[in-house]
Image (cartoon, rainbow, N blue to C red):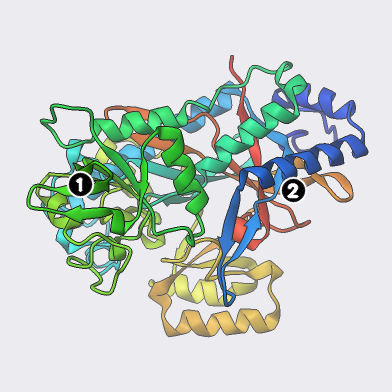
Amino acid sequence: MAFDEMHGRGRSRRCRTPYRAMATWLDGQTSEQLTTRRQQAEALFHRTGITFAVYGTEEAEERLIPFDIIPRVLSAAEWRRLAAGIEQRVRALNAFMYDIYHRQEILRAGRVPADIVIQNAAFLPEMLNVDPPRGIYSHIIGVDLVRTAENEFFVLEDNTRTPSGVSYMLENRETMMHMAPDLFSRNRVAPVEQYPEELRATLESVAPAGLDRDPVIVVLTPGEHNSAYFEHSFLADRMGVELVEAHDLVSTETGVMMKTTQGLRQVDVVYRRIDDSFLDPLAFRPDSVIGVPGLFEHYRAGRVTIVNAPGSGIADDKSIYTYVPEIIEFYTGRPSILKNVLTWRCRRPDDLAYVLEHLPELVVKEVHGSGGYGMLIGPTSSRAQIEAFRAKVVADPARYIAQPTLELSTCPTVTDEGVAPRHVDLRPFVLLGDRMRLAPGGLTRVALKKGSLVVNSSQGGGTKDTWVLED
């Protein structure tokens, strides 16, 4: 039986303390009122244009991300425990990246196998001995958490490349404040609306040294057909910086310049939302038309900062994930505060044998997969799907990891049948520059289909506002 975040677990079904004000509010709402509020929230999202693109058809389909009007609630004490674990993890992962692109002490010590780093597609040899400002590789990180009991949270994965979803966190909060001001009056909820300001402060803090003016920041997007384009535009607007595409930038002898109506203007920080391989056709894929020729050369020379740094994807590869507890202990000297999910590495013969024997019970993932794609959820898959996936794992075991099927916690959610529990996860967002900045709460994703454990929006999931109650 899944842990219910509102009522706990057991026969008593007593409302947990963080949800008491929420329960009182829900008791005063009829099904018709909740349905009306949901429809009004959807109308707000439509007017704002909050959409994402779903790929896999002939043309990317634009969809409205479903939003649930019942917030998820965390107590201040719960958040403090999570925040300590998240901060520890983020610092250790950045120390790991600095090490593997410099002395590689963790590899020489045998704490992480050298081959899964050096031979990893996310490892960029071009970054060897490059010193990013403040020694930071991932300035913007999303840590995916799942809950299985009152005091049991696990890290499902780390997102250290170009994590998305923070715009939904901010829009969810604005929508809830508009839709249910009476509910806010019953709770002291930690604010999140300062995130764009804190993001800009973080970006400014990692600008190249020695500037005699305010840093010029841009958000580099692949363009309007990208699935997260709404977020790119949203963040640029909220920070008060330019949203640019490759054709808006040009490399000169002195640095990366932005074309403006007043002429060229030097750019100091590029918050990129483009994958490594497409960033610069002179350094990486020569067929890239969405990258900026010469950008990487200027980055290596210290004339411009790229956020997140090229090569930062090595820290969120799922094969590296299995070693994060060892990584944390190696760099901090302390055990990991937040646990990993038990994981079998199919590259190891004993683990592979176990996985193949228990496929119907496990979740199997590609080490480079994302967005809910390239994975098998054994308990909800047909025999034919399981056998087809078995063939893939046997053909290339190192490409896969496997985990038990966790009973994700549930939160009350408005459905067509009324308020019902639905499984959720949580993605807090961390900023690292001159200091650590952690938005209270984050993005709660919810599996809207009854019994489903898949929360990804591309797979039918939705989102909730996430409340951290202040003491």
Task: Give coordinates of residue 132: x percent, y percent.
Answer: 18, 44
Q: Which residue is disc 2 drawn over?
A: 422
* Picture quadrant where residue 26 is located: top right
- Could you say where residue 115 lies in the image, as x and y percent from the top left? 24, 68
Say which residue appears at 41% left-offset and 80% top-offset: 396
- Name the one closer to the observer, 90 or 208: 208
Asked if residue 177 lies left or right of residue 28, the reply is: left
Characterize the local packing of mark 1: few (<14), some (14-19) or many (20 or more) Cα atoms within 10 angstroms. many
Q: Earlier in the sequence, mark 2 or mark 1?
A: 1
User: Which residue appears farthest toward the front when viewing the image?
Assistant: 261
Give the SS element for disc 1. helix
The image shows residue 71, relative to residue 358, as above or below, that is above
Q: Label 2, label 1: how many angstroms apart (C-alpha)?
A: 40 Å
**Quarter of the figure with residue 3:** top right
User: Pointer 1: what residue?
Assistant: 98
Above or below 238: residue 401: below
In the image shown, does 437 or 83 lie closer to the viewer?
A: 437
- At 18% from the left and 27% from the top, the residue drawn is 213
Amino acid identity at mark 2: Arg
- Residue 152's place in the image compared with 221, above or below, is above
Determine which of the numbered discs, if any, sits on residue 212 in the image: none
Q: Note whether residue 109 is visible.
A: no
Closer to the camera in the image, 400 or 222: 222
Q: Is residue 382 visible in this depiction of the protein? A: yes
Instruction: Give the x, y percent position of residue 260.
Output: 27, 45
- Residue type at mark 1: give it: Tyr
* SS assignment at label 2: strand
Left or right: where 175 falls relative to 38: left
Q: Residue at x 62, y 29 (%)?
A: 467
At x 45% / y 48%, what residue is drawn? 232
Badge 2 crowding class, 10 Å Cα cut-off, few under 14, some 14 to 19, many 20 or more, is: many
